[in-house]
Amino acid sequence: MALTNAVVEAAEKRGKPYEIADADGLYLYVSATGSKSWRMKFRFRHKEKLLTFGPYPGVTLKAARGKRDDARALIRDNVDPSGVRKRAIEAERAAAMEEAKGTPFEEVARRWHALQAPRWAPVNGGGEVAEA
């Protein structure tokens, strides 16, 4: 039986976490504290996996179903949806490393110092970057 917005809103905390199933692996997880989040169970290469789509009401029932459908499309294309975000981060990091090649060390060090300085007290080198 597919979920409705009324059922999702009416879900209240209990003594233990519980799940309310929707369809095709999507379910609403209700924690013992009463917070609600969308999750999806699926199998990929003979292993059971879990995706979390976000908290309700930040992610609506309609949006969660859309994310589930997107994940199922990736699975059909033999792509693990739980690894997509990780691969995107790795690609971004690799692009940054490639861009940094050939950059003088002093320039990299000054950029790093400028990013870190606001967190430091003046005694630790916070504030302005000293010019050489």
Image: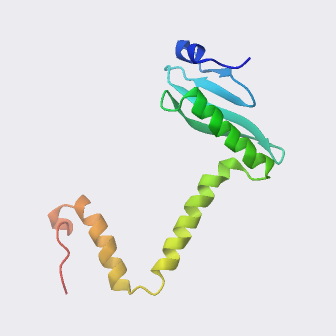
Residue at point 68% right, 43% down?
70
Q: Is residue 112 left or right of residue 39?
A: left
User: Is 80 situated left or right of 15 in this image?
Assistant: right
Q: Position of residue 17 (x, y in %)?
A: 59, 21
**Picture coordinates of residue 120 (x, y %)?**
23, 61
Vertical order, 76 against 36 (above or below): below
Q: Residue at x 52, y 78 (%)?
A: 98
The structure's colour scheme is rainbow
The quarter of the picture where the C terminus appears is bottom left
Which of the 4 image quadrants contains residue 41?
top right
Q: Quadrant of the N terminus?
A: top right
Q: Residue furthest right?
A: 46
Between 78 and 47, the one nearer to me in the picture? 78
Tell me which residue sits at (60%, 53%) in the image.
Answer: 85
Query: Residue 106 versus residue 125: which sits nearer the camera?
Result: 106
26 is higher (above) or lower (below) than 132: above
Up-down relation of residue 122 to residue 108 (above or below): above
- Tell me how many marks there are: 0
Instruction: List x then y, in percent, for residue 31.
Output: 55, 23
Quarter of the image for residue 65 reads top right
* x and y percentages locating residue 63 in the rendered image: 58, 34
Name the residue at 52% across, 67% down.
93
Residue 9 visible, this orientation: yes
Looking at the image, can residue 14 be seen? no
